[in-house]
Amino acid sequence: MTYDIIIGLEIHAELKTKSKMFCACANFESENTLGNTAICPICLAHPGALPQPNQAAIAAVVLAGLALNCKINTLSKFDRKNYFYPDLPKGYQISQYDLPLAYSGTLDEIDIVRIHLEEDTAKMTHDQKTGETLIDFNRAGVPLLEMVTAPQIKTALGAKKLCQHFQQILRYLEISDADMEKGQMRCEANISLQVPGTWKLETNSISGKDLSAKVEVKNINSFKAVERAIEFEIKRQTELLDQGKKIIGETRGYNDQTGETYSQRLKESSADYRYFPEPDIKPLNISEAWIAELKTKLVELPLAKVDRFVKEYGLTLEQAEIISADKNTAIWFEEVASELRTIISGNENVGGCRLIANWLLSELFKYQTLVSAHNFAELMGILFNERINSSAGQQVLAVMVKTGKHPEEIIKELDLEMSTDDEFIKTAVIKIISENPSQVGEYRLGKLNVIQFLVGKVMAETKGRANPQLVRKFLEEAL
Ligand code: ZN
Ligand code: MN
């Protein structure tokens, strides 16, 4: 039979503050950082170490709350959420329980129950080969925003779209990079199926007799996975209910390879966490004046921008949505539009803006996508290893954008590789010195910065293939 589908989301996002949530450690959590280097007694949970809340992180959560039309608790506090796991050395997570920073908002016509602030846990990596588990505490204590929606979402697609929209907002506000692949944003979905007419939504939760249990799905690491995991759960629960079986209230993991969820553990209730106020941190007084100040930092958000782009520039809804999905693209579009306004006359403005959108989306984007991430990484590697100089790099990129070719191929074709052959450079140096006697004279009289001119000449003579440091060295020797 058909059941009512009830979905709620919990979204965690790492805030990109300079320092961690409760200590002065740097908040960097990138793959390039050596493990366990941004750590201190506080984020390692040494006994007696005292946490100090990060004001920038509090501001970021209040800002997110304002962006989702939440109310802000002027009296807020931190609480301890007790549980044991090796990635949580304190044995509790500092989080917020009954007085979250923000509550009662909306996003995509879905009620937002709360947005609170907590700390991230350490990162555990399981080595399949050795069976060892490594723990990196660089992530321990990174400020984490948690947003909870009411269980009002009805489709897997709707859940995915809400996650995407929330990511855009976090990026527009510049409080989180929110990259799901990097674990900077993590979505968990609660899914239950109920017989129509047997339940109702009351203050953010479902009530009724003989309710079917809800299942929480974790380890979802892409937008596509949000949709697929929920679709799988709807199918699984429908089949069980149709067979007259009960749904077990549990936490399930998601396997991206198979597109299936699997049982992990029985679901905890908030009572299991024995929440109590964090005694080491004073309650937070969020003043109205500070909230007002933060309000001035609210930028135009994606939805408003889409709306305006449709009205002001005559774009289609789809064009406006694609352009506004990324703040920088939207800014770039408006810059072009305002430049174009000075070129064409007023009446044709809208037509001109549509033309920009068409060309941006169908032509300019096409070139961008011709440069694969792989080829671009290759080019960066070549530049990093100084095999070509940056002006040659620009030439290569220009060809990559047009043809999608591999940079190595282009470098060969255009003969751009830097020469490590000293004789080749010395020959060019001697030639340039003999051709520019007046500059050489000035240099010898003490006008030392003339050398920059001569370096440029040699670089041109060698078609950019000489190493500029070597050119300079040989010039100085010859002069
Ligand atoms: Zn620390
Ligand atoms: Mn949480």
Image (tube, rainbow, N blue to C red):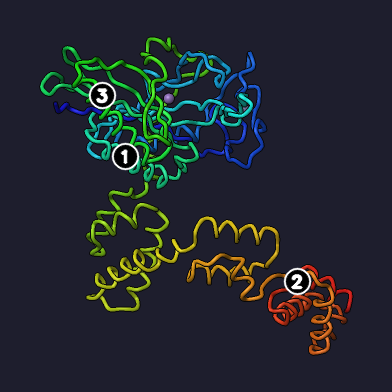
| SS of the residue under disc 2 | loop
| SS of the residue under disc 1 | helix
- The crowding category of the residue bearing disc 1, from other C-alpha atoms within 10 Å (few below 14, some 14 to 19, many at least 20), is many
Q: Give the mark toward the camera: 1 or 3.
A: 3
Q: Quadrant of residue 445?
A: bottom right
Q: Which residue is at a point 14% across and 26% down the rendered structure image?
A: 1
Give the number of the disc on residue 267.
none
Identify the residue under disc 3.
Answer: 237
Q: Quadrant of residue 411?
A: bottom right
Q: Please tell me which of labels 2 and 3 falls first in the chain.
A: 3
The percent coordinates of residue 479 (x first, y second) are 88, 79
The percent coordinates of residue 196 (x first, y second) are 12, 24
Q: Which residue is at a point 41% across and 40% down the rendered structure image?
A: 222
- The crowding category of the residue bearing disc 2, from other C-alpha atoms within 10 Å (few below 14, some 14 to 19, many at least 20), is some
State the CA–CA distance, disc 1 to disc 2. 52 Å
Callout 2, which amino acid?
Answer: Ser
Depth check, front residue: 477 or 331: 477
Callout 1, which amino acid?
Answer: Lys
Identify the residue under disc 1.
Answer: 160
Residue that lies at the very extreme toward the front in this rendered image: 243
- Please tell me how many numbered marks the rendered image carries: 3
Callout 3, which amino acid?
Answer: Gln
Question: Up-down: is 263 above or below 235?
Answer: above
Name the side, left or right, on which 323 lies relative to 464: left
Question: Up-down: is 129 above or below 364?
Answer: above
- The crowding category of the residue bearing disc 3, from other C-alpha atoms within 10 Å (few below 14, some 14 to 19, many at least 20), is many
Q: Which residue is at a point 75% across and 71% down the rendered structure image?
A: 419
Identify the residue under disc 2.
Answer: 419
Q: Quadrant of residue 432?
A: bottom right
State the CA–CA distance, disc 2 to disc 3. 66 Å
